[in-house]
Structure formats: C-alpha cells, structure tokens
Amino acid sequence: IARSAEELLGGLNEQQAEAVRYDGPALLIAAGAGSGKTRVLTRRIAWLLSQVGAWPSQILAITFTNKAAAEMKERLTTLIGPVAQRMWVSTFHSACVRILRRDGEKIGLRSGFSIYDTADSQRLVKIICTELNIDVKRYTPRSILAHISDYKNGLIDWRTRLKEHAPQFKPGQRGSKIGGFGDVEELYACVYAEYQYRLATANAVDFDDLIMRTVELLRADPMTAEYYRRKFRYILVDEYQDTNHAQYVLVRELGGVDSGGAREPGARGAGRTGPAWITVVGDSDQSIYAFRGADIRNIQEFEKDFPDARTILLEQNYRSTQTILSAANAVIALNPGRKPKRLWTALGDGSKIIGYAADNAQQEGAWIAGEIARLTAEEGFRYSDIALMYRANAQSRSLEEALINARIPYQLVGGTKFYERKEVKDAMAYLQAIANPSDDVNLRRILNVPKRGLGARAEAVLTAFAAEHRTSVWEALESLESMPDVPTRTAKLLTQFRDLMRALQTFAAGNDGSPSEIVAEVLEKSGLVAELRKSTDPQDMTRVDNLSQLQSTAAEYEQNTPDPTLNGFLETTALVADSDQLPDGDEDTGKVTLMTLHTAKGLEYPVVFLTGMEQGTFPHSRAMENESELEEERRLAYVGITRARQVLYVTRAAVRAQWGQAAEMLPSQFLDDIPENLIEWKRRETGVDSLRGGWRDDGDDEFGGFEGGYSSSSSSYGSRSRWGSASRRASSDRSSYGSYGSSSSRGGYGGGSYGS
Ligand code: ATP
Ligand code: MG
C-alpha cells in the first residue's frame, strides 16, 4: 500500500512534518516528553518506504522494548500493509540475536546458543566464585556481575582486563588461582575471564554479550560487516538517550559510519551507497538508565559525531495538560547543564495536581484505593485509565494490599516475573539443554530436578571430568563409560538421566516445528509435573498451573509465527521485558496498572498516581549521596510526571517500613520543586509532621530544606550508612530499580531492553 505524502503528513505539526520528510543522512529529533517523537519515527519509516523508495529490508528500526516494537509494526502495517510484519523493527537485543543466529559461527558461537538471563548468569558467577575461593558474602555474585556488565557495556574485552590486572591467570584451568587476590580489580578480571570462558564452552551468551559480541563479529569479519552495511541503508533509533557505549558503537558499525565512503544526501533508495542514513530520537531529560551503562553523551554529542547532522526540536506536547507540563518543567529545570526547552500544550490547564500526605504506607494505599473508586464511579474513568507508579518494586506490596481490600482489579508489571519462577525456569532449562546440550548451567540445573538421586557428588564427578578434558558437562556424560571410579549406583542414575535427555533430544528433533509438543513431552517425561502433583503444598498447585501456562505460551507462539522452531520459542521467551507484559495501548483490561517509574518510560495514562514521594524513597536514599545520581532521580521524576494525560496525583507517607523497621520519612524534595499553586493538597501535614514542626522549609539553596530536615531527624535513618560510597556499587540492588531483566530481568532490554 503506497501512501500519499499528504496522508503521511496528515495531522502533524510543522516541525513533526519536517522531521518525517527530512532528506539527509543524519537526523536528531530532540524533544521533550509527549511531543510525538515515537509517532514521528513511525511516520518517517512509512515515508522512507513510500516516498523515498526504500525497501522494507533496508530498514532497521530500534525500539526500547519488544512491546514498543510490536506497536510500531502494528502502526506500520496500517500505513504500508503486511510487509511491515517482516521488517527489522525490534530492540537492540532482538536485532543482535537475529544477527548472531545467522553469523555467530564466525566468532565461535554455534547455532542454537543459549541466552542466559540474570539468574542464570548469577548462578554461573557463583559457581566460579566457589571454585576461585571468593567470599561471596563480601563479593556477591550480583555485584561482580554488575561490574562484568559495566565492562561489556563499555566494550572492554576480558583479555584486556586480564592483561592489565591478572596476567598470570589462565581461564579454564581450575586451580590456577586459588584465593588471595591482590586487589578487587584482579578479582573482577579473573571472574570476568573465567565467566566468558564458561559461557563459550556452554555455547551461551548473556544479555550484554548480545550487543558486545555482535560488535565483535562486525569488527572481526569484514564480509559480515559488509553484508549488513549493504543491507541496512536506514537506521532509526527511539529512546536514543538511553543507549550505552556498546549500542552506540553497534549503530556506527552497522551503519558503516566510520568505514569511509561519501555520505550522499542525494542518493535514493536501493541505489544508495556509503554509510546508512541515521535517525535518532530522544530526550536527554528522560535518560534514566545510567546504572545500566546508558550514556547521556550519546545524544548530547550527536551533532559532533555526525557533523552533517540536522537537529529538529519538537516543543508542542500532545499528551498532558498545561498544569502537568508546568510541574514537569519546574522539576527538570533544576538540573544544571541542560539545554532549556519549554514544552507547551494546546490542551489547556486542566485540573490541579492532587496531593495527599498519609500517616503511613497503609493509609497511603487506602486513600488511593478510595480515590480510584471515586474516579471510576463519579468521573467516568475506567480502571485501565489509571496507573500507580513507584520508585522501587518493594513499594507495590502496601498498594496491592489496599487494592485487594477495596476489591479493585489490578495488574502488576514487573516483580517476580513469569519466566523467573522456579518451576518455569526448570522447564525452560530442559528446553535449553535439549536445544544446546553444551549449556552447562542449564544442564546442571536439571541434573537433579526433579529429585533423582543425582546430588552434589554426582555433579562433581561430571564437572571434574569436564574440567580435566576441557569439555562440557554433557560431553562428560556422553563419556560416562570411560570415566574411572564412578560408583555403580551413580553410574546407573547418570545413565538413566542421559537416556532421558537423549530421548527428549530425539523427540525435539522430530517435532522442531511444534515447541508446544516439545514442552508437553518435557513436562511429562522429566517428571516435573508428576513431582508437583505428588506434593501437598498448595503452592505447588499454582506451579502446575504455571507449567500449563508455559505450554499455552508455546502454542500461542506457534500460531503467531510463520516458521516456528524450538530455538525461536526460546528466543522470544529470553527477551521478554517487563513492559512487554502490558496489554496494547487502547485495550480495556479492566485493571489498574502498577509499575516502577523505570518501566513507565514511553507510556501514557489519563490518571497517574506518583506514590512514595519521600526523601529516601524518591529520590532514592542511595542517590542522595551524589549530585549526578540526584540529577538522574530528577529525570525519573520528570518521566513520571509526564506519563499523566489529565490527572496527576502525588502522595507520600510520613512513616514507611525500611529494612524491616518503621522509619520517619520527610517529604520528597521534588514536591518542593513543583510550584505551590499547581498542587491542591487534600491533606498536607500528618500527625507525624506536626510533631516535627512542619515540613516546608524555605531554604534558598536547592538542598537547604532537605539537608536541614534530614539531619534533624537523622536518627530515624539508620540505614543511611549502608550507602557509604565504597559499598555503593557492590551493594547496589539493581532489582529494586524495577526493570531489566533483565531486561530485563528479564529485561531486556529490552534489554533487555535492554530489551530489551
Ligand atoms: P515520550 O517522550 O514519553 O516517549 P513521545 O515524544 O514519544 O513521548 P508520543 O508517544 O509519540 O510522544 O506522543 C504522545 C501522545 O501525543 C500520543 O498519544 C500521540 O498519539 C499524541 N500525538 C503526537 N503528535 C500528535 C499530533 N500531531 N496530533 C495529535 N496527537 C499527537
Ligand atoms: Mg516515545
């Protein structure tokens, strides 16, 4: 379906239309929240296809989550027809999986490689720590992994780290380093090297590897690089402010930006040569993933990176009322060193922001539940129009309790995610081990799940043999007969396990096109379901339901995919990010949505409650130590405020449980930053506040009010010292940030969004 220029530009303002039409090699669309950036990006793709003569296969569009990718494809389908479904519109992570599946062999990744999620990676790091005699209480696998992740996001190779900090260490030779590290750098370097070695023998990658190893591939193999540079003539990236260094380099490598060749503004479509045309879209005020390596300079220096770049600013906001925008503008204006931008809207002032100060978190939840009842009963809002947002996942509990008490249906985005539940991970581990037998982590996970008498000793027999012969655990199992001194009983049980896995592999090979049947076979033959059914623990019933849900997910995947395969199914599940659990935009779910502020990026709701507006909750206590982290919290506040379309609530509790103890909480400094006349307080002071002598302290320096107030009640902040700067990184609790799984969690980026 070719669209006319008028159709593609219809309903856009002048700047938006200019961005859609722009005919040149490098374009930055820099604009505040809700100004139509994502909308313009989508239209621009349609424009390139129907007006510039680009082929669908020449376009690579990067979104922040899989859900955003699906939505963009959907809109493109209505604009240009079904060809959109086959286009490369995806997260960085998904795009890299696709590249590595096709060409990963050139850097030693065999087809069917596994993708480890955060939990898998932590397991592996823990195994390594035990072998290297590292005290995991002092150096938690989580904190070590955070450092490894930083290296990868910065494209720092393990070989380089080893050369600099531990030249004598040889990965893959256990015993070559037994405890006694000179310094932490040496420790991290050794674990990093060993971790990469283990991933390689397991034929596996982690989320960060997806990006780093794709860059490695493009740099190591000129033919592959050439293939993609010829292929992708147009690269478009949404949420560019949250790209990290590795992603930045990836875009340049894929686009052939540094490989010379003239940038030819005049050349068209299929005939173009030289570097790809690059369009990036973002808002430096919404950069909120620094803890995951996002580098705000990528967007700030775009014009330097691309001297021929054109920048287009969008200033009209189509999402929110002027009241909401003025609050957002006032908060973000306090960040130093930013380019001032004024967002405006034609939507009018709308209603005031509503504030509420509760005595404690329970009361905060109860009041919110009451408001939701009123909004739906009297003001015509639906439950699905309403979102509750908070800084850290742990805050959801008191809100959930209040909603349950008030019988208000809700959905929680994030938290313990489906694919992180133990029983689901167990079943997935079988599938991974079937698809990729060298995957040691997953194979070892299921060796004794369900219990079959293969305990730590049996595992040790296998891993010792594997280490000695430098093979995988599966190959060790295959060589069982030539292993010396295996007790007869153990040998028999290992043989049974091997037979089981061989049978499942054979079944999978014969039914590759039907992952749901493979899932069914695994659930039955492994004994996973049988073990849960035998149990009297009521929770195990839920676990059985979850496993049947997994089978349904596989069936759903099968129906929605042209050429379903087991590997394809494993991929879709590996890259699920928090926000992907959200239903589509307009769908009325009949439920209120709860999520962290990080997960809320890019989304919008008619009614938003920003909860837990307290010093130490938001801004997070960890961030109050450090000015640049405080700036990031302020950006997070800006993201939160600008999610609201019509009504914004800000609520706080004067007492909140922290580290298992009730702590007095002062109002968030962000409440102070919002001009007073924009907020209508339903309750402003609590009993606790009046004992303290009020809270609005008009110190003229930015932190005056807060520092003063803080120290006056600092005794209640016993936890403050936990965040001493030395331990900050090590104890940084990434999961409390909500998303990534971890992407990602799973997150992915969406990376995890990371992709994930
Ligand atoms: P964010 O910074 O939060 O990612 P954004 O800049 O990507 O926001 P969009 O999500 O694209 O903004 O648009 C915000 C809202 O405004 C959407 O509901 C979109 O449909 C609407 N919108 C954008 N441009 C226009 C326009 N020209 N006319 C009417 N509505 C518009
Ligand atoms: Mg957007």
Image (cartoon, rainbow, N blue to C red):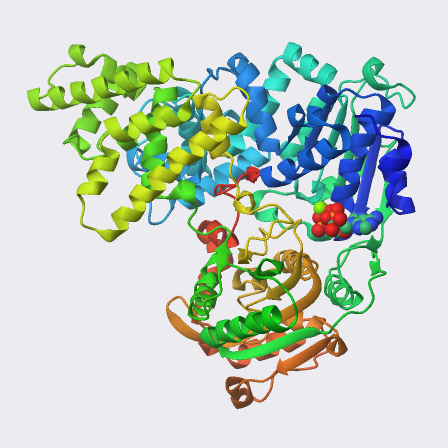
Is residue 244 something that shows in the picture? no
Name the foreground residue: 492 vs 719. 492
- Residue at 63% x, 63% y is 608
Q: Quadrant of the C terminus?
A: top right
Q: x, y (%) of residue 24?
A: 88, 29
Q: Is residue 696 above or below residue 294?
A: below
Residue 490: percent from left, percent from top: 12, 24
Answer with left or right where residue 344 lies relative to residue 648: right
Task: Please identify the quadrant where the N terminus is shown.
Answer: top right
Q: Quadrant of residue 356?
A: bottom right
**Residue 464 higher or lower than 528, as above or below:** above
Front residue of 223/177: it is 223
For image coordinates 81% across by 34% down, the residue present is 44
Residue 449, relative to residue 346: is it above or below? Answer: above
Which of the 4 image quadrants contains residue 245? top right
On the picture, is 74 further left or further right than 134? right
Left or right of 601, for residue 443: left
Residue 511, quarter of the rendered image: top left
Q: On screen, 443 above or below 109?
A: below
**Identity of the residue furthest to the left in this view:** 488
Location of residue 382 in the rendering, given as x and y in whole percent from the top left corner:
60, 62
Q: Is residue 497 visible?
A: yes
In this rendering, the count of numbered labels is 0
| Image coordinates for residue 683, horizontal then vertical, percent | 60, 83
